[in-house]
Image (spheres, rainbow, N blue to C red):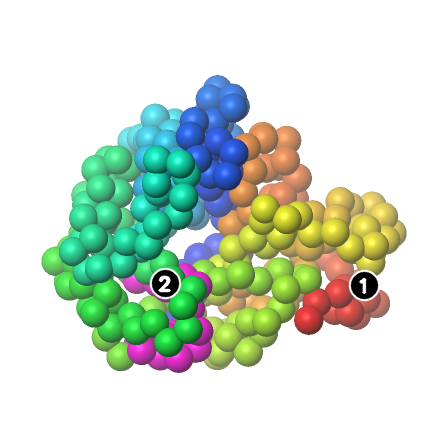
Amino acid sequence: MTEFIFPRMGYGAMQLAGPNVFGPPKDRDEALAVLREVVELGITHIDTSDFYGPYVVNELIREALHPYPAGLRLVTKVGARRGSDGAWIPAFEPAELRAQVHENLARLGVEVLDVVNLRVPEVPGTSVTAQFAELAALRESGVIRHLGVSAVSSDQLTEAQRIAPVVTVQNLYNVAQRGDDPLVDRCEAEGISYVPFFPLGGFTPLQSSTLTSVAARLGATAHQVALAWLLRRSPAIALIPGTSSVAHLRENVAAADLVLPEDAVAELNTIGG
């Protein structure tokens, strides 16, 4: 069994790109300030990818933070590219994955990537064997320290584990979208960090009268309550809420100190399904 490798609160850099994660940020200076504040707040887990922008986010991270402080863990993902119109295009062949790993290395300005997640196309029955084996070979060569998977089923996780250790699963999960409940429990049992993407709803922000009323009662924001619920849900969960605002970043990080009473948890549990 592996051990959880991430702190409970990290930062997802996706929103530093332009609208729909495409093009440059609307405020470059603020984007750089957010990244520097991430480090000032003691966050040691930044989630990124070369296909955010594309390239924009990794270039911002390097400009803001390189040379990187000791202990900072940069986590990237491979398996897609972007079209000239911003379309998300699967790039899932082993040779494509190898090229993406080296592109991430170059743009981030590192010799080793701490964690690389394999982003799996959301097509039922997709095999990950050849693709994960390619990343495992890169891990053996020393350019990747750890491997993870993203947008996977429990069966695909098992398939990957037959090839190499999996330290993290990154899937859609939040207080309102809890289809991955069994996989969260499995990750907890196996010591795998479960990193929810769209912990606050993503492109369709969480909207819930229950969430709003609990937040008002606790003197917190709805976002803080949603993040606190995730932290309470399982010790396997490591958060990477994203933002392009320094103020919002501080608000998100403060959620780690929010204690949810039992009655609030019971109420929030009625939201999802």
Q: Residue furthest front?
A: 85
| Rendered location of residue 236, percent (x, y) | 51, 67
| Rendered location of residue 177, percent (x, y) | 63, 64
How many dots with numbers? Answer: 2
Nearest to the eye among marks 2 and 1: give it: 2
Which mark is on residue 264? 1
Q: Relative to residue 192, is residue 160 drawn left or right?
A: left
| Image quadrant where one finds the N terminus | bottom left
Amino acid on which disc 2 is placed: Val
- Label 2, on which residue? 120
Please report whichever mark, 2 or 1, sits nearer to the chain's N-terminal start: 2
Q: Nearer the viewer, residue 219 or 58?
A: 58
Question: Measuring 29% from the left and 70% from the top, which residue is drawn there?
Answer: 128
The magenta span reads 147-161
Check residue 66 for magenta coloring: no
User: Does dot 1 land on a helix, a strand or a loop?
Assistant: helix
For the question of whether residue 124 can be seen, the reply is: yes
Question: Measuring 58% from the left and 31% from the top, which residue is drawn there?
Answer: 245
